Image (cartoon, helix red, strand yellow):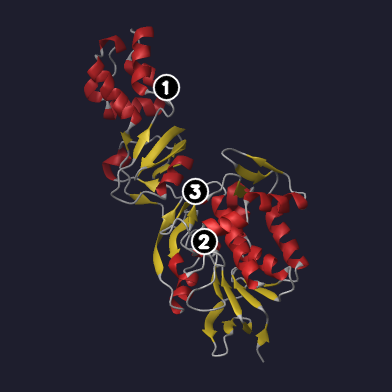
Amino acid sequence: MRDHCDVLIIGGGAAGLMCAITAGRSGLRVRVLEHANRVGKKILMSGGGRCNFTNTGAGPANYISANPHFCKSALARYTPADFIELVERHGIAYHEKELGQLFCDESSKQIVAMLLAECEAAGVEIRTSCTIERVVHGDAGDFRVHTSQGECSAPALVVACGGLSIPRMGATGFGYELARQFGHAVLPTRAGLVPLTLSGKHQERLDGLSGVAFPVTATANGTSFSNFMLLTHRGVSGPAILQVSSYWQPGDALLLDLLPGSDAMETLLRLRRERPAAELRTLLGELLPRRFAQRLCETWLAPLRPQRPVRQFNERELREVATLLQAWPLVASGTEGYRTAEVTLGGVDTDGLSSTTMQSRHVPGLYFIGEVVDVTGWLGGYNFQWAWASAHAAGTALLA
């Protein structure tokens, strides 16, 4: 005999749990099916264990999608303030780290505990270690889901099983397979918010500088982010690089302003006036991390003989130095891939979904929410906000 309920949700992450809460609050019988041994694993590891659960400035401009307008409706109807109200109601202390990013003061475990408490209050049933074997859409309109724990059915099925990022947390492409099964297009996926790798001479030029970090403005394909860059054994990371990685693809130009917020030429002219006897390499070692500045002089500026006193540099030479400082070309070979990526770019094509309800335009009762959809946020709490907002949109629609 088949086990029946009102709503089946595949995936017990941020989006799945929020959708379950929203639908369950109004009396719907909701069941969450999670293949891992516990829910919310990515929540637990996020933000260094403190969960960057939203961003106060989250808006459509902070998201990447083939249809940049798609996310507007959901984001407008469930805002950061709405989630903050939930966090405060549960007495969770939080703080703003930078740029609107909100973190728990103590632990990301508090966010998972809050979501589980809300699920319990809403009568939501959660089944963990529950592997989905196949999904069938019956003639009567019900979705029959065959699992390792038996068969269950419901008139509504919500796909909230995320993307391909961080496979050690259990990420798979199952959501995309389901989308294709039901006639949805899936846009090409790739790793987003991910460190970049260097190879060959480009890696050799920075050999031995792992661990050096400093502020930059990174630009790729007309989009710029200002924050810290970290040099690693394999390439570059840090917030500025993670952000721009979502806009960069192999072969694209990537330029770094090494003196963000200042005019390099004006700075060099001022230093030439104030300290004419100082060597250029000494001055650059004061403007940038000393080890990096030394490598810059040895490798990129060697033809200009940076060991000379700065008074010996004419304006053409200073302009050459300034240009390098404000548009240092970094030739990346690729990314660290899904292994370390925080998100997956691409996914279920939004053309096949309602932006108001997240329901399929092809199959009534079928919904896609969260990371599995072709909506990807910036670093800094934006992807959690999309999870909450898209889940709330679907959960609300289920009540109609």
Res 1 → quadrant: bottom right
Secondary structure found at label 3 = helix
Q: Nearer the viewer, mark 2 or mark 1?
A: 2
Q: Are marks 2 and 1 in contact (CB under 8 Å)?
A: no
Amino acid type, residue under disc 1 in the picture: Leu
Question: Which quarter shows the C terminus?
Answer: bottom right
The answer, for residue 37, to whether it is visible in the render is no
10 Å crowding of disc 2: few (<14), some (14-19), many (20+): many
Amino acid type, residue under disc 2 in the picture: Glu
Q: Residue 261: x, y in percent?
A: 44, 27
Residue 68 lies, with reference to residue 299, above or below; the image says below
Mark-to-mark CA distance, 3 and 1:
31 Å
Q: Which residue carries the number 2 mark?
A: 371
Q: Which residue carries the number 3 mark?
A: 62
Q: Which residue carries the number 1 mark?
A: 287
Residue 150 shown left or right of residue 61 in the figure: right
- N-term-proximal mark, 2 vs 1: 1
Secondary structure found at label 2 = helix
Viewer-proximal residue, 335 or 381? 381
Amino acid type, residue under disc 3 in the picture: Asn
Q: Residue 202: x, y in percent?
A: 29, 40
10 Å crowding of disc 1: few (<14), some (14-19), many (20+): few
Q: Residue 34: x, y in percent?
A: 61, 70
